[in-house]
Image (tube, rainbow, N blue to C red):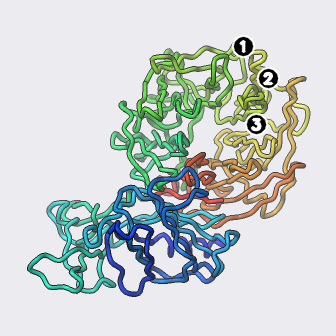
């Protein structure tokens, strides 16, 4: 599938509008719902040109989010050829409907020809002529990446003069609906004469536009897209699949990136496709970047360490944010946080505590503890209180559990204080018990000395950290690689052999950890040419998909140190061979972004792509908006 097709397809179908309580325009298809006495209706308007072969569609309505899309819908339309839109009447008046939009490449809408899907919650069905809400459905290609909508140029700078927000959000008559900005219908006043008792209206600019200076402007389409720019943040799929985004850097300057007091924590609804701001009862949204994170028991999100600022390193015409060990002259570009947060995602609360150590860029894995899940924390960068002018690579590991009061209680893993000093390393679980709990963890790369151990291994059975002896195929060092488990095998993707981590030169590698003998084997993938070049990157993300065999790799810095917009699927065979498929590009390049496998809800198995930086040439620019991959 080519990038051109995905981009055009997303452009066409992302502009799907549901108008609550509005009548059709006359060129729509019309359907009767299952409730003749309900009195409610909605209209769906389709704008833009269709891509050939992806024109037929079906709509399903649910009165609330179902446990899965296999559940019977309250209303389901027949397979429908292209129209400008359609209207559904005879619906129960209610709030929080969920609309599912499926597009097919065949005229019979056969299940095997599903080409795109959109899910939208929070839809209110009202009586005809009484509503003016405009709903948009994010429709995304199957097997591709779709971008959530961002304001058009004429909304960013509307040219409409204003003195207050109300001037931008006001409504006015709409003489020609085809030429109006967000048209809708409402009932005529008693002293007005209009066809069918309804008249067309429009917004002066947009229902969420603001008066900025003296001109109306719409800066974000939140809740259809993220509210805040951020990079080096945390994004985790929690209960019901909803994704929580917290922390990260949102401001840039000549000396680096910093947090913003205006940045809040956000969520993405796995059954609504809507973003929301979440209040966690503490100053968490703008806490820090470079935090370590892990979800324990499906409910408790543990955030550890981080830093409130990260410096940038000038390399030619590039300014790349990078955290590394250094002796500072004056103020260090990193001030490492001594705090941890335990976030109860069900209760919506967060508790801040001091676990007894400070670290930024730590590795954190969920492990099977003596009394339930624990967080295994491998220190990244550290900053001792007695030497605040020095950033060092960490050695120690910790086992941490949330206490009864919500604080994080940690103990040092015996012997880890003398482990290899590391930063920008990577980790993976290499052994699980019968209940799925992780018991053994491998840490790879990040070793500041090429003569030090490339790998180390933690085992619950011994409760200790041990160096792994390299047998063959083990490089001297790797910084910024990402380890994943795919098809039961440990693989690393990306990374650089130099400590600055800016020039990717490490090809995909598979790893075998012999826990009996404490040894490590590495093997390069054998890829060559274009396939290999696609996977040479750093500051990227690698996310195993729900099938357990495929990895989605997105963004990062390429060999020319330019942020990448490319996305790649890598399938791992039973015998360790890689199959590489290039997807269409993301809407914008991204480095130091986050990709989150959604684990629940109607978008179960999708991958949400948020934040990051899109440009490091002549200054740093944040990547706008979020994107999503549907497998």
Q: Residue at x 75, y 42 (%)?
A: 485
Instruction: Give the alpha-carbon distance from disc 3 to disc 2, as whole Å.
Output: 14 Å
Does residue 544 sit above or below 465 in this rendering? below
Q: Secondary structure at mark 1?
A: loop
Q: Secondary structure at mark 3?
A: loop
Q: Which residue ends up furthest to the left in the rendered image?
A: 191
Mark 3 or 1, closer to the camera:
1
Q: Which mark is residue 467?
A: 2
Q: Which residue is mark 1?
A: 415
For residue 67, side relative to residue 218 (left or right): right
Mark 3 or 2, closer to the camera:
2
Category of crowding for the residue at label 3, using alpha-carbon neighbours closer than 10 angstroms: few (below 14), some (14–19), many (at least 20): many
Category of crowding for the residue at label 2, using alpha-carbon neighbours closer than 10 angstroms: few (below 14), some (14–19), many (at least 20): many
Q: Residue at x 66, y 59 (%)?
A: 631
- Where residue 583 sits, quadrant-wise, is bottom right
- Verify CB contact (< 8 Å) between mark 3 and mark 2: no
Front residue (pair 65, 511): 65
In percent of width and height, residue 394 lies at 63, 24
In percent of width and height, residue 158 lies at 28, 71
Does residue 166 sit above or below 335 in this rendering? below
Q: Residue at x 22, y 86 (%)?
A: 195
Q: Which mark is residue 402?
A: none
In percent of width and height, residue 342 lies at 48, 27
On the question of residue 71 being in view, the answer is yes
Front residue (pair 76, 557): 76
If you read the primary sequence from the N terminus, does the residue marked by circle 3 or circle 2 appear first? 2
If you read the primary sequence from the N terminus, does the residue marked by circle 1 or circle 2 appear first? 1
Q: Which mark is residue 477?
A: 3
Instruction: Give the alpha-carbon distance from disc 1 to disc 2, as whole Å.
Output: 11 Å
């Amino acid at each position: 599938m080519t990038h051109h097709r995905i981009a055009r397809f997303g452009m066409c179908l992302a502009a799907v509008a549901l108008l609550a309580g509005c009548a059709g325009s006359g060129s729509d298809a019309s359907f009767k719902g299952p409730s003749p006495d309900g009195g409610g209706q909605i209209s769906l308007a389709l704008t833009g040109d269709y891509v050939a072969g992806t024109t037929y569609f079906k709509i399903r309505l649910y009165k609330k989010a179902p446990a899965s899309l296999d559940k019977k819908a309250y209303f389901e339309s027949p397979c429908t050829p292209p129209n400008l839109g359609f209207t559904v009447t005879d619906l129960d008046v209610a709030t929080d409907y969920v609309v599912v939009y499926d597009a097919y490449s065949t005229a019979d809408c056969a299940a095997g020809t599903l080409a795109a899907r959109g899910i939208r919650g929070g839809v209110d069905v009202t009586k005809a002529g009484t509503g003016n809400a405009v709903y948009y459905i994010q429709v995304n290609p199957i097997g591709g990446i779709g971008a959530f909508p961002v304001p058009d140029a004429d909304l960013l700078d509307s040219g409409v003069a204003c003195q207050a927000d109300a001037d931008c959000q006001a409504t006015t008559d709409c003489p020609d609906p085809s030429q109006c900005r967000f048209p809708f219908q409402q009932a005529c006043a008693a002293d007005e004469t209009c066809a069918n008792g309804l008249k067309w209206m429009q917004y002066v600019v947009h229902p969420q536009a603001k008066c900025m200076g003296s001109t109306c402007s719409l800066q974000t389409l939140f809740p259809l897209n993220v509210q805040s720019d951020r990079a080096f943040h945390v994004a985790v799929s929690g209960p019901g699949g909803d994704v929580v985004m917290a922390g990260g850097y949102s401001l840039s300057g000549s000396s680096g990136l910093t947090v913003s007091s205006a940045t809040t924590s956000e969520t993405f609804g796995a059954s609504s496709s809507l973003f929301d701001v979440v209040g966690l009862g503490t100053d968490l949204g703008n806490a820090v970047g470079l935090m370590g994170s892990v979800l324990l028991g499906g409910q408790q999100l543990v955030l550890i360490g981080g830093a409130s600022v990260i410096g940038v390193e000038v390399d030619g015409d590039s300014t790349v944010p990078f955290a590394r060990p250094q002796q500072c002259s004056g103020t260090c570009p990193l001030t490492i946080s001594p705090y941890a947060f335990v976030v109860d995602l069900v209760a919506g609360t967060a508790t801040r505590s001091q676990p007894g150590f400070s670290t930024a860029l730590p590795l954190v894995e969920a492990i099977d503890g003596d009394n339930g899940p624990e967080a295994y924390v491998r220190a990244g960068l550290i900053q001792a209180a007695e030497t605040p002018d020095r950033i060092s690579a960490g050695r120690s590991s910790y086992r941490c559990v949330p206490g009864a009061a919500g604080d994080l209680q940690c103990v040092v893993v015996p012997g880890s204080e003398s482990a290899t000093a590391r930063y920008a390393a990577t980790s993976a679980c290499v052994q699980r018990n019968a209940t799925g709990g992780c018991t053994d963890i491998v840490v790879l790369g990040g070793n500041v000395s090429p003569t030090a151990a490339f790998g180390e291994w933690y085992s619950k059975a011994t409760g200790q950290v041990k160096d792994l002896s390299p047998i063959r195929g083990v490089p001297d060092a790797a910084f910024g690689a990402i380890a994943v488990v795919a098809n039961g095998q440990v693989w690393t993707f990306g990374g650089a052999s130099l400590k600055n981590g800016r020039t990717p030169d490490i090809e995909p590698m598979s790893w075998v950890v012999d826990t009996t003998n404490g040894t490590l084997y590495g093997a390069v993938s054998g890829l060559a040419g274009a396939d290999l070049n696609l996977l040479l990157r750093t500051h990227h993300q690698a996310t195993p998909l729900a099938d357990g065999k495929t990895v989605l790799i997105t963004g990062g810095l390429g060999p020319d140190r330019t942020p990448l917009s490319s996305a790649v699927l890598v399938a791992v065979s039973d015998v360790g061979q890689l199959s590489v498929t290039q997807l269409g590009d993301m809407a914008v390049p991204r480095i130091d972004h986050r990709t989150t496998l959604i684990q629940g809800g109607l978008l179960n198995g999708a991958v949400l792509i948020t934040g990051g930086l899109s440009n490091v040439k002549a200054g740093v620019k944040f990547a706008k908006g979020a994107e999503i991959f549907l497998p």
